[in-house]
Image (spheres, rainbow, N blue to C red):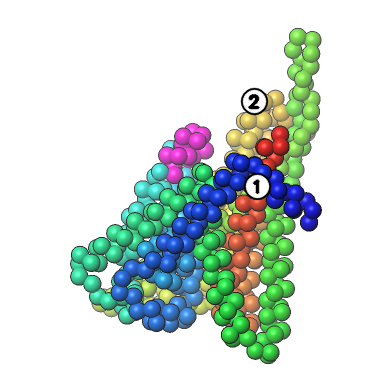
Amino acid sequence: MKAFFEKLRLVFMDDTLRRRIIVTLGLLVASRVLAVIPIPGIDAARLQSLFNGSQFLNLLNIFSGGGLSTLSVVMLGVGPFITASIIMQLLTFMVPKMKAMYQDEGDAGRRRFAQYSRLLSVPLAVLQAFSFIVLFQRQGVLPHLSFSAFALDILVVVAGSMLLVWLGELISEFGAGNGISLIIFAGIVSRLPASLAQLQITFTPALLPVYAVGIVVTLLVIFGVVYITEAERPIPITYAKQARGGASSGGVSTYLPLRVNQAGVIPIIFALSILLFPQMILQFLVNSSVAAVKHISTVLLGLLANQLFYAIAYFILVFLFTYFYTAVTFDPDQISTNLQKSGAFIPGVRPGQPTADYISRILTRLTLVGALFLGFIAVLPLILKAITGIQSLAIGGTALLIVVSVVIDLVKKIDAQISVKEY
């Protein structure tokens, strides 16, 4: 506890860090203000009823930062940008120029890559805004609009989504932590008081054992996420001795830390985006006037509504995206080249390609553990929901994973800033 307060003191004594935290809080408050500004003509009672009976809409609401539940001007949240980022990173595997731009061109290449992601997110936002507005019109939440009013609503919603992405990037650049993740985090946390109030209203003594088990599972999930996120496998590294002018340097030993979960919370976000985007399109097509399209959409929606199929698909996607994102962000060949250039080597392993193969083998085994853990934790709430019948568990588990991972990432970045100041 003493160490915690000492660290807190260092945070507020550091002018740069204090300014970054104030900027972050200010921009998060701005995002929450935007999330409560609704588009006109909403039937609030119908909207509330619709959300109470739809796990699909509640999951989408997580990525909108809570804006979807109020049909606010930022109802899309950062969802289009996340989808665009997934598409762009998939392209790094299929287009060599994209991979070179992302991995080999340094900061300039990553800035161009992010710019392409932003440009791609605009048409995706238009598509999602059109789908949502039509969907809510058919559900009686929004009135039927003239063409000009309909186009204006789409323009406002798309602009709101891009404004939220801009706020997230401002947080990343001038604040503390990853801005996009923090906006999702703020949306989840903002719903916590309402969720606790709902649990209090529905509480009965008969459900006490269920709530007790839920609290225990929540604590175990938090412990597991923190433990796996912080776990690492050190690879010993030795720097060769170099003699210059009668003096020798080098010969020191250090290690290369490989984390069990290199990807963090990104696989969870990617997997949910892939699962939710088709559902959004199918929700729009299910009312099609074409009989074949309507039938296929109904069948696919029924399949996605099956909890067993959904859990299996969720687990597989989290597992695959853990490997995918690790492969995109961590290149053993590049690490091997950098070690060789700096005169470093792994004891017992030849420099060059053998070093890359050695690192790759260790990384593959570590990622297997991390992917299995993330996949299990992701579907655990669905299992508990099937056992207890409490709908909110499926939502709360996903939100809990995101919240814990974002907090860990934020704390590590603040620690790094404090360490830089001390040195």
The kind of secondary structure element at disc 2 is helix
Q: Amino acid at mark 1?
A: Phe
Can the viewer see residue 62 in this picture?
yes
Q: What whole-number distance in Å separates the C-alpha atoms at marks 2 and 1? A: 40 Å
Q: Position of residue 82 (x, y in %)?
A: 46, 55
Q: Position of residue 144 (x, y in %)?
A: 25, 75
- Extreme residue toward the top, this view: 245
Disc 2: CA contacts within 10 A as few (<14), some (14-19) or many (>=20): few
For the C terminus, the quadrant is: top right
Q: Amino acid at mark 2?
A: Lys
Is 182 covered by the magenta stretch? no
Residue at 71% x, 28% y is 344
| Direction from residue 203 to residue 96 in the image, left or right | left
Is 111 covered by the magenta stretch? yes
Depth order, front residue of 377/41: 41
Q: Position of residue 279 (x, y in %)?
A: 42, 70
Residue at 75% x, 18% y is 242
| Direction from residue 37 to residue 381 in the image, left or right | right
Q: Which circle marks residue 12 in the picture?
A: 1
Depth order, front residue of 376/361: 376
Residue at 64% x, 25% y is 341
Q: Position of residue 346 (x, y in %)?
A: 74, 34
> Disc 2 or disc 1, which is closer to the eye?
1
Q: Which residues are magenta?
A: 99-114
Whether label 2 touches label 1, CB < 8 Å: no
Q: Is residue 126 above or below residue 88?
A: below
Q: Main secondary structure of the magenta part?
A: helix
The residue where tag 2 is placed is 341
Can the viewer see residue 287 in this picture?
no
